[in-house]
Amino acid sequence: MAPVRNPLAADCLTKGTLLPSSTEVESILRSAPQPLPLRICSGGTTSRCTEDQHWTLDLSDGHRTLVLNNDHTSVRLGAGLTMGEIQAELAIHRRMIPTGLSGLPGAGFLITGGMGPLSRSLGLAIDHIEGIRGIWGNGHRFRITRPGDALLEHSPEHMEWRGLLGAALFLGVVQELDLQTTPLLSVEILQGCVTPQELEALILEAEGFPNGISLQWCWGARLEVMLVARSDDRLALQILRHQREARKLSQPLYTHLSGIHQLPALGAMSLALTDEAPVHQEVLGLLGPRWSDQSQALITALGVAMANRPHHRCTIACQQLGGAVSQQPCNSSSFIHRQAEWKPWITASWLPGDRSGRQASLGWLEQVRDCLHPLCPGVHLAQLHDHLPWHARELEQAFGSWLPHLRDLKQRLDPNGVLPML
């Protein structure tokens, strides 16, 4: 069993952990140990991979397949592997899949969208999935491959495929995925800290960037920025090197990496040098189009929020999308926000056992969410909040008009609510 890396999840008083082999998941879902829903864990990075007095189905030991095809252009992955483990193995063969800013997440990263610093040129991780195997919540096995263009949009096969890409956690337990790989891409990275005014200018410039470069930032005790450019994109490198010369960065760091599996963690520069004892956290990811000339007012408002955060580990971070993400049709997956340019995420933090601190931090999260909402009306449901009062709202913001169809799928494929509710 891998460690539950999320401190809030690790501190839950669960009923216990189930560690099934790949052949035992079906019987577990059919027997549905009470109370429901089951919680699913692979990387152990989300706050809801466990729950008080509930069972957790842990895939980290019994689902560790990693098989490349003969020419290394595709890979079969078990749901128990972390993104770091996958990328390290693929890098040996000079291959990669588009992953994010951390190597810790498990398969949940892939099936909830999969965003990273190369998404602007390579698309989302779900855009590279070619096949999925697992067990529906009703205990029946499935094996689905990417539908052909001729398949009708409302056919059962297309609906199930679309449901799994972005909303699988409500419908079934994914055990294996087939993904297309790409050649390993080296990258160059510029990191440093900036003022809010410099961030405003950088956001406006970034909205005109070519697809080979992306902006990420994290606002904590300091405001850290990270620019990632593909080494094979001459224009992207020119822009990155211009930023290196023109941008006033505190603690500038310029590095060349053989691939995104070597990415440094975003946010390390933004943290204060204070006690780093474990804290409990909830994270909400939002999605929205370009901010353009509204960036200044937004960054000013976020600055006020940061000045009034209830705990020093409360942060606001953001990564840039656009480009190839928008080139896939909205009905190709449950990720409907294909026109999103920015994905900000808000992290509320408090000390374990501090009920008033939890209430204050979650209230702060809601205030920041409402501040961002006019420019970021969508939700990226990579973290589940079915225990919080605004869960119904986030479902509507994540799935929009697709939500009633997802609920129809839920009723058919998980009628007893073995998995989290929609």
Image: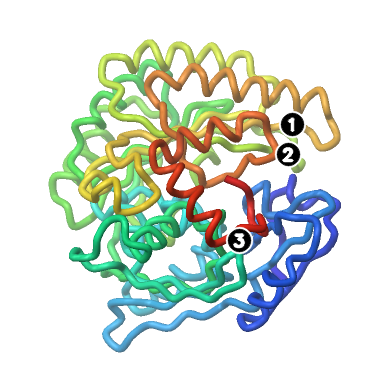
Q: Are marks 1 and 2 in contact (CB under 8 Å)?
A: yes
User: Which sits in the foreground, 119 or 312?
Assistant: 119
- Identify the residue at image location x=40%, y=26%: 376
Place residue 272 in its image quadrant: top right
The percent coordinates of residue 85 (x first, y second) are 52, 70
- Identify the residue at image location x=61%, y=72%: 139
126 relative to 202, above or below: below
- Which corner quadrant holds the C terminus? top right
- Classify residue 64 as left or right of residue 9: left
Place residue 163 in its image quadrant: bottom left
Q: Measure how far apart labels 1 and 2 are at the Cα level.
A: 5 Å
288 relative to 422, above or below: above
**Which label is found at residue 350?**
1
Categorize mark 2 by other alpha carbons within 10 Å: few (<14), some (14-19), many (20+). many
- Classify residue 327 as left or right of residue 396: left
Q: Measure how far apart labels 3 and 1 are at the Cα level.
A: 22 Å
Give amino acid for label 1: Trp
Residue at the farthest left position = 235
Give amino acid for label 3: Gly
Residue 217 in view = no
Which residue corresponds to mark 3? 43
